[in-house]
């Protein structure tokens, strides 16, 4: 009998190696190679355990034809439906990730109860908690009377046999994918082979029966869903549940969605009775704003189709260090370095002997370059000690030449600002016309130096 061949699989990226090494050659991670057998490892799977069958031809079609909208299950939780693109799609698989204790199980429990109350069959399977613990959470949320079917199981074959009994479920929630294991793989639960095999089995069930499957995933210290990246490619949608420990609000961010937009967010507020929807996130992020303090600028941003106003805070202080500090929370540190360089090179504003601290209020994270103008305004305001107008918003992209470039959705940003009482706006010229829905007073500088002169006066240099 032939000796079974062993291989070493990286638990971070899923790459297979013939021998052990301290560092994975594929992703560069250290101490992530684990020995696994090829009988149920990478590259074998269920097909390797039986004789391969001959292929069969499939029907080919054309690009033209009737298009049907994806059938969805609307939860009734507006922020969750917004993030998913209108509700859970039947026959789809969704991966939800987030830090421990952020509220993933609370959100899914509330969604399961809402769907069960609408007459849908919902099955909640937990591999981390006992049924009694889930019931305690449901009682705390006031959802104990919801007709949600519970189970505490980690074996994939047993889960599939359980949910196959009776009427086909409309939604299956598995918490979490790292705890599941299947008989087709020989490795331990949580390894790359088990996570991928379990996810593949559940996705195959969703596609064949039309039930929506939600998989919960843990998040690593780097902020990525633990396990192989291939799981994110297998599922139809990936949602990240974000939030800071010191803040009550939570953000459900869509990073992949085959049936909807990938840049939507849902905003929730955590309370004693669970998660509450926040219909107007701008009021939440601007709730404790100090209008008279220098170094604070209001940025009119966009998250998908939703405009969001958030305060950007800057502190520029004289440094006693040879190399001044640059600290950023909620924004890209490399982009801050670029804005500082443009201000020094083209506007004559010197930061070489100052520490610079930048913070996005409320624990919010900004990724779009339209925040450049608001960051620059906050930096100049803090350096000069002059407060910016309290009723003014800023948005625009800054190029390396010091020019201010237009950004998309200007009219929507201005409309949201006007709704919240902002009467002034600093924005790029050109691009979209803002007539009719704009704020009362517009300042459209052609270059960043014009904004610096407006804030600090002619003696800005």
Image (cartoon, rainbow, N blue to C red):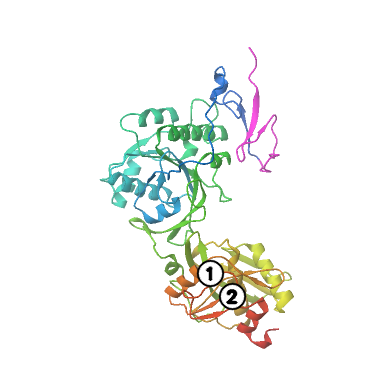
Between circles 1 and 2, the one closer to the viewer is: 1
Q: Which mark is residue 454?
A: none
Secondary structure at badge 2 equals helix
Please report whichever mark, 1 or 2, sits nearer to the chain's N-terminal start: 2
Q: Residue 4: name its quadrant.
A: top right
Q: Is residue 91 above or below residue 36?
A: below
Q: Is residue 327 above or below residue 208?
A: below
Left or right, 306 with reference to 52 = left
- Does residue 390 belong to the magenta stretch? no
Q: Position of residue 223 (x, y in %)?
A: 56, 51
Q: Is residue 387 above or below residue 420?
A: below
Residue 228 showing in the rendered view: no
Separation (CA) of disc 1 from disc 2: 20 Å
Q: Position of residue 455 (x, y in %)?
A: 61, 83
Q: Position of residue 230 (x, y in %)?
A: 57, 39
- Front residue of 441 and 322: 441
* Residue density around tag 2, few if under 14, some if 14–19, many if 20 or more, within 10 Å: many
Magenta range:
1-30
- Front residue of 372 and 36: 372
Instruction: Provide the residue designation for mark 2.
Output: 378
Instruction: Provide the residue designation for mark 1.
Output: 410
Residue 62 showing in the rendered view: yes
Magenta segment, prevailing SS (helix, strand or loop): loop
Query: The N terminus lies in which quarter of the figure?
Result: top right
- Does residue 19 belong to the magenta stretch? yes
Q: Residue at x 62, y 73 (%)?
A: 376
Q: In the orientation shown, which residue stands out farthest toward the bottom?
A: 458
């Amino acid at each position: 009998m032939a000796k079974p061949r062993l291989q070493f699989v990286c638990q971070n990226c899923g790459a297979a190696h013939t021998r052990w090494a301290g560092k994975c050659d594929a992703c560069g991670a250290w101490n992530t190679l684990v020995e696994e057998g090829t009988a149920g490892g990478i590259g074998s799977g269920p097909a390797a355990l039986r004789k391969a069958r001959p292929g069969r031809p499939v029907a080919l079609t054309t690009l033209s034809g009737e298009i049907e909208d994806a059938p969805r299950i609307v939860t009734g939780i507006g922020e969750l439906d917004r993030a998913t693109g209108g509700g859970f799609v039947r026959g789809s698989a969704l991966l939800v990730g987030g830090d421990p204790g952020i509220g993933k199980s609370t959100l899914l429990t509330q969604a399961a109860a809402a769907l069960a109350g609408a007459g849908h069959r919902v099955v909640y399977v937990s591999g981390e908690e006992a049924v009694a613990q889930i019931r305690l959470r449901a009682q705390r949320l006031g959802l104990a009377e919801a007709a949600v079917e519970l189970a505490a199981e980690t074996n994939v074959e047993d889960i599939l046999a359980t949910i196959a009994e009776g009427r086909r479920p409309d939604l299956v929630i598995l918490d979490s994918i790292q705890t599941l294991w299947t008989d087709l793989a020989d490795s331990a639960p949580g390894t790359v082979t088990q996570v991928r095999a379990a996810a593949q089995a559940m996705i195959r069930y969703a596609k064949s029966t039309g039930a929506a499957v939600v998989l919960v995933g843990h998040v690593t210290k780097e902020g990525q869903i633990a396990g192989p990246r291939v799981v994110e490619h297998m599922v139809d949608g990936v949602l990240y549940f974000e939030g800071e420990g010191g803040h009550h609000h939570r953000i459900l961010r869509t990073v992949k969605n085959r049936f909807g937009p990938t840049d939507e967010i849902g905003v929730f507020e955590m309370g004693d009775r669970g998660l509450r929807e926040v219909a107007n996130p701008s009021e939440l992020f601007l709730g404790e704003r100090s209008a008279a303090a220098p170094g604070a600028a209001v940025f009119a941003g966009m998250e998908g189709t939703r405009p969001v106003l958030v305060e950007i805070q800057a502190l520029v202080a004289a440094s006693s260090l040879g190399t001044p500090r640059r600290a950023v929370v909620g924004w890209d540190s490399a982009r801050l370095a670029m804005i500082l360089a443009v201000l020094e090179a083209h506007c004559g504003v010197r930061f070489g002997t100052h520490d610079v601290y930048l913070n996005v209020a409320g624990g919010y994270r900004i990724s779009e370059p339209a925040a450049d103008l608001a960051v620059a305004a906050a930096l100049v305001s803090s350096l000069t000690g002059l407060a910016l107008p309290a009723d003014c918003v800023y948005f625009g992209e800054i190029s390396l030449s010091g020019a201010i470039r237009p950004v998309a959705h200007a009219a929507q940003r201005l409309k949201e600002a006007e709704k919240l009482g902002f009467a002034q706006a600093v924005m790029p010229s050109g691009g979209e016309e803002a007539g009719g829905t704009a704020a009362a007073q517009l300042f459209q500088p052609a270059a960043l130096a014009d904004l610096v002169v407006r804030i600090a006066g002619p003696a800005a240099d």
